[in-house]
Amino acid sequence: MEQLKIGGHTMRSRLFVGTGKFASNRVMAEAVAASGSGLVTVALKRIDLKGDNDDMLQALRLPGIELLPNTSGVRDAGEAVFAAQLAREALGTDLIKLEIHPDQRHLMPDAVETLKACGELAKDGFTVMPYIHADPVLCKRLEDAGAACVMPLGAPIGSNKGLATLEFLRIIIEQSNVPVVVDAGIGTPSQAAAAMEMGADAVLVNTAIAVAGDPVAMALAFKMAVEAGHKAFEAGTAPVRESASATSPLTSFLND
Amino acid sequence: MKIIVNNEEVVFDGTTVAELLARLDVSLAGIAVAVGTKIVPAAAWSGFALKPDDNVTIIRATQGG
């Protein structure tokens, strides 16, 4: 199986996982390990001056894990660039998941600000991974602006509604010269497998693992689904037909 | 002098970013510091002098997707 590369980074798995919403850092670390993922998202926060004892980075110090900081919480391109620069300094990585979603209710990504920030960050040497709506035109524009991949959404963040944007994802995958990572909305392993079968290069899953009854078991289920879906894509799926096509010989043997 | 750190007013009798971090008793692993909109790399903390009313941002990683 060919390894996925994003910018100069080789990915050991095609499943990327987020670290939000887990009940504890221990469950988070166990789920990350079970997922087999090599790329794990983190957010940024201002430290609390009254006492700051978040040990989540300690929990994520696992062999083979690269951190992917996001810019969640910013409202425009200027704030996104600032957040990315802070993230690079804090974590020593050029990877940045660029997400600008000022709308608190639906968390829809702002295409205009994202495109602007993508160009600036790419020029500044970042490996930019923009989170966007499943907009095929925007994806090409981001590619031109220096995006290392595109991360179109399947459905709103945390909604678990699956590949609501399916037909547009198909166009994006067909046209893209950079890896396509389906991000947001994937609620079940079968949806992750479906995205991979249609040729997505990777998927990013957070809520569906973190709030599952057993997050560690669900992380393993996603790992298997992503591997199965990618294997099926590589194998080449059989064509869909309008009429039956026999799998057994049609010569009758009981009476001629 | 009085400065702003993460939107809170802090009275501080030192000079540099390094002294401020020591005064705040912040664990230094995995943090980043900016003064205004300028990132101050860790290597420059001990040489970067703060001025009254400077706006300092200190961040670290947290859980998120």
Image (cartoon, coloured by chain):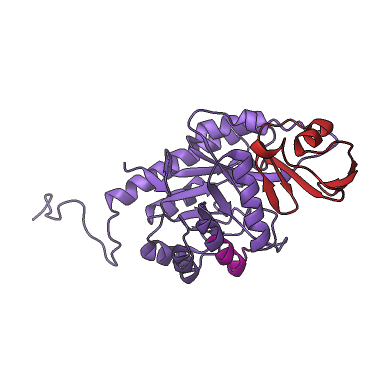
Chain colours: A purple, B red
| Quadrant of the snapshot with the N terminus of chain B | top right
Q: Is residue A107 visible?
A: no
**For the point 58% across and 62% down, which residue is it?**
A117
Asked whether A7 falls inside the magenta stretch, the response is no
Q: On the rendered structure, is A173 left or right of A134? A: left
Answer with the quarter of the image where residue A172 lies: bottom left
Residue at 63% over, 29% down: A59
* A77 or A247: nearer the viewer: A77
Residue at the far left: name it: A256
Q: Which percent across, then down, holds residue A182? A: 49, 55
Q: Position of residue A148 (x, y in %)?
A: 45, 55
Specify the segment rendered in magenta.
A106-118
Q: Where residue A1 sits: x, y (%)?
A: 31, 41
Q: Viewed as shown, does residue B64 lie left or right of A66?
A: right
Report whether A233 appears left or right of A56: left
- Prevalent SS, magenta region: helix
